[in-house]
Image (tube, rainbow, N blue to C red):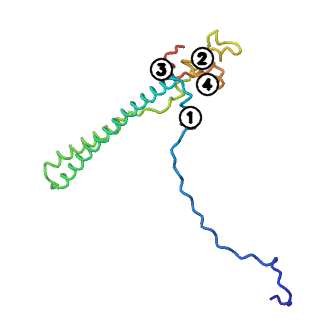
Amino acid sequence: MPPDGGVRDESQSKPTATAPTPSYKKPMRTQRFVPVLRYGANKYESEDFRSQRMQKMEAYNQQRNVMLNQRNEHQKQLADLTAQLNHLVSQLALQPKDAPEREDLNRQIQDIRFNMKQLQMSKDVKPNKLDNRKTKLLFKELPDCAKGPGKLAEWIAGNSLILQPKQIAMLATTGDGAVIQYKSHDTADMVCF
């Protein structure tokens, strides 16, 4: 009760502190990427497009299986070399320090370690994407059919088998000439200046 004997005003009283709610992070849900129109889009495909898609998928699966087999074989070889190395190290530990067999075991251990290092460095790493720096070429002099307003885009669209038609708007022109992007390294290498 207040000292003056009046009624206590509840609006002026301070609110009581509540305990803070525990904050925790919800676990991230990892979901596989499911493309849009996964089930319904296939019914609109033409037979040619479907056969091309299946051929590409089959070629990709074959290449993937070859790479997986190579990786498994590589891992088996490394495992065999590791087992040999462990066996030789255990034999070396059992030998007395002045034994003449230690030198032979040391040489074998060094050979196996060298083979393991060579095996680890012999992986053929293929980049997933093309290196665009190798597909872009600088043309100091364009052909006559590509000169003039709108002619460059028309020339690129006409040569869409070897050029990137989607890059028309992104073609850079520098002080030296036009930069044109090809679809593959081989095509860019075939172009003579």
Q: Quadrant of the N terminus?
A: bottom right
Instruction: Judge depth for marks 2 and 3 and give the one in front.
Output: 3
Which amino acid does the dot numbered 2 rest on?
Answer: Phe
Ranked by sequence position, the earlier of labels 1 and 2 is: 1
Q: In which quarter of the image is the C terminus?
A: top right
For disc 2, the marked residue is 139
Instruction: Judge depth for marks 4 and 3 and give the one in front.
Output: 4
Where is residue 34 drawn, in percent x and y?
53, 41
Q: Distance between the residues labelled 4 and 1?
A: 27 Å
Q: How crowded is mark 2: few (under 14 residues within 10 Å), some or many (20 or more)?
A: some
Q: Residue at x 82, y 84 (%)?
A: 8
Instruction: Judge depth for marks 1 and 3 and give the one in front.
Output: 1
The answer to whether the residue labelled 2 contacts the one labelled 3, judged by CB atoms less than 8 Å apart, is no
For disc 1, the marked residue is 40
For disc 4, the marked residue is 166
For disc 3, the marked residue is 186
Tag 1 secondary structure: loop
Q: Distance between the residues labelled 4 and 3?
A: 19 Å
Q: In which quarter of the image is residue 139?
A: top right
Q: In this view, does 98 lie to the left or right of 25?
A: left
Quick one: 168 or 93, which is closer to the camera?
168
Q: How far apart are marks 1 and 2 (CA)?
A: 45 Å
Tag 3 secondary structure: helix
